[in-house]
Image (cartoon, rainbow, N blue to C red):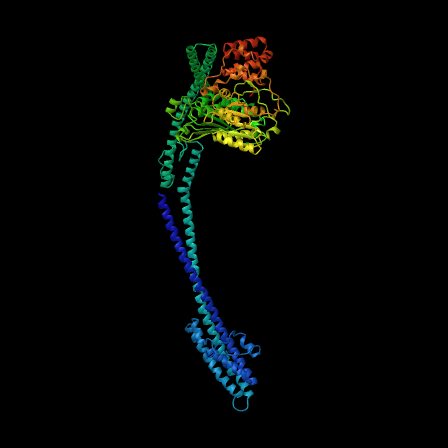
Amino acid sequence: MRLRRVTMGFSAVALLSLALNAALLALILRAHGETVRAQEQRRQAHALTSGLQREAEQLASLVRAFAASGQPRYLAYYADILAIRAGELAPPAPFEPATYWKDVIAGLRAHRPPPGGARLSIVARMRALGFGAEEFRALARVQAATAALQRIEGQAFDAAGGHGAPRLELAGALVHGDRYNRLQAELAHALVALDGAADSRTHAQLRAAQQRLDHLVSALLACLLGGLALVLTAAWVLRRQVLRPIRVLSRAAAALAAGDYSARVGGHGASAELDDSFGVEELAALGGAYNGMAGAIEQDLRRRAAAQRALERARQDADDASRAKSMFLANMSHEIRTPMNAIIGMAYLALQSGLPPRQHGYVSRMQQAATALLALINDILDFSKAEAGKMELAPAPFRLERVLADALALVQPRAQEKELELVLDLGDRELVAGGAMLVGDALRLGQVLTNLLSNAVKFTERGSVRLAVQVERRDADSVALRIGVRDTGIGMDRAQRERLFQEFSQADGSTTRKYGGTGLGLAISHKLVGMMGGRVWADSAPGEGSRFTVALRLGRAPAPPAGAPAGLQTSPQTGSPTAPAPEVAAQGMAALRVLVVDDLAATRLASQNLLRAAGVDGAVDVVASLGAARARLEAARQWGRPYTLMLLDWDLPPGDCAAWLASLAAAGSAPPPVVALTVGDPALAEEESAGLGLLACLAKPLQPAGLRRALAALPGMAPLSPPVPASAGPGPLASRAEPAARRRAAGKPPAPQTESAAHARQAPQDPPHDWLDRLRRLLADCDGDALALWPACQAEATRLLGRAAARRLAGALDQFDFDQALAVLTAATPQQEPTP
């Protein structure tokens, strides 16, 4: 059984039933109309015969009233009644025969026959109502009796109101005589016969119409019952052949959605072919298709489950292999770095021993090769730590400007070699002059910045590299920073940017061949920034340079107590204590007038921002050439507002700033105190400016610490904090110590990390507050910065660990055996745990 046939069959039968019901309804309405018309004709016929009876009685009453009184109005009313019956006059409106003439005779209404109107005789009215021959025969008897009565009534009228004197007695005798009464009786019988004939006829018509209506209603009820039976039959067929199979399909689909892929239409294990007993052919085909689909899905899931199990085993094997690889790389890197540090240290000591030039060149190349190899090992170790999830952050309070200074210091030698200008744009007063301490892992943040800066210097042949720091948002607990590194190098296209942060990937093969590198630096930086809760991205175009942006949020450390001494600052990357730059009184800063002379617009803007952030609220003017500077100095002198400080780019063309300053002095317009800024070695600038009385010679970029020292050296500028004694400053080893893991990104040889601990102890220093945790981390990383930290913390380590343990620790450091030193430190302080 096909659903289409069933639907068409039921539809045809339903349409036929509806058509039949509509026809029966039309016939019923027609029969009902005939019944209503028959009832109306019966009513009108009865009203006509009743009116004739009342008129006969009224005429007899008028005749007798005229015969008794002789008043002519009775005669007029008599004549009008007969005229209306004969159709000679139109009935008055409104006209009700039962009451009208009685009201007129009683004087309650005036009788005025209308001049127009419908004039119908009694015969015409009977024909309009469909009276038959029998009724007209009865009417003829009525008319005959009426004519006989009219002859007697005419004699009475003549006697009562004719010619001569009225004879009322004779008129009364005529209308009250036996003959007149017999004729009245005959008229009454004729009228009754007429009424009976009309009643019989209309009753027969009404009964016939009602019978037809009853038959049609019965036929309609039969059709409705047949339709109900058809609907019930259709519902049964629909339920059995359509709805029940759909419910079965729905249950099977629900079981399939619940994960029971063995469910089938028709029960578990049913075949894909279903017979007609299931339902209509379409649903049977659908059920068969469902069974086939479910079977295919079940087989596919079995295959997928088997493949998934195989993939899980393969993934587990791959994870095990990756962990083994990471452990192998970490162990091998750790084992190799200890002898590499010894090689680098011994090479440094050999270079300091006064070797002949040829041997000095050999040892120098050996040191450079060892440094490059150590940098590669450190990269591999950091990457393996990140891959194995073993890299952890160590948040601690730090000053951001110190981290920026360390990162710039690491790339400065390479930038000087390429004659690139480094620019530091740090214009937030709180970060520069407010002494704000942030909370984060300064070591890892410095690693990220060093990687970005070293890449910028590596891929830039001429121009500048700009490091900009902006505060996007700040609240009571944190600061949102946006740190950007912009260069004027080769740039990258879109495809190169998309694979920029992938491991072991650079822009292309030619980049690797020309510039070198492993491609791990940016990948490690990307992971570190992600661990800090920030993000890093790059914007670049070929030939237009690149801009790397780091956005992250750092916590804010509690402010130090008011009046607390500045003490020593600790480098977050080396752990070495350094003397802080003195703070300058704010009242002296407000009166400063500074002139910035530099040919690079970015440097002029950065210097201006840094001066404002340092608290200089006076005039800060910028010019781009020596000629413009001379004109500005002369104008300020003429206005009586001379400059109190000049920041001079020592490398300005034509390249002889010393001669320019000497010419100013010879012309009698001595310049204000000058701070010389140079891309090259500041010592060379000091030699060139000997005798000119420069306030300071600083290497570019201008940094907050150098600026504060220069401002504090101005005449009349008293520092807020006393100068740190020379004994507390950085020792010879600490000043040279820089983390090898950071210096390798700049492509420069490491600072002397391998000088013996005995030599380092010649300049003891106060240790930082977290020296133990820093020393443990540096030893664990086999970082030569541990040698720089040891002189400052040796006395405290002797007090805390004991003299014997301190001697063993110093001996291990003398042999560059960082693993042994870490074992001694761990054994001596088993209860200590590194702070997070």
Q: Nearer the viewer, residue 138 or 89?
A: 89
- Residue depicted at x 38% and y 50%: 13
Residue 550 seen by the camera: no
The count of marks equals: 0
Quadrant of the snapshot with the N terminus:
top left
Res 494 visible: yes
Residue at left 51%, top 87%? 158
* Residue 750 placement (x, y as % from top left): 47, 17
Q: Is residue 809 above or below residue 592?
A: above
Q: Position of residue 374 (x, y in %)?
A: 45, 16
The C terminus sits in image quarter:
top right
Give residue 603's position: percent from left, percent from top.
49, 29
* Residue 130 location, quadrant: bottom left
In this view, the residue in front, 153 or 498, is 498
Nearer the observer, 95 or 658? 658
Which residue is outermost to the right?
Answer: 563
**Residue at the limit of the structure toward the front, as seen here:** 667
Is residue 715 found left or right of 380 in the rendered image? Answer: right
Image position, residue 237 (x, y; %): 40, 44
Asked where in the image residue 294 lies, by quadrant, the reply is top left
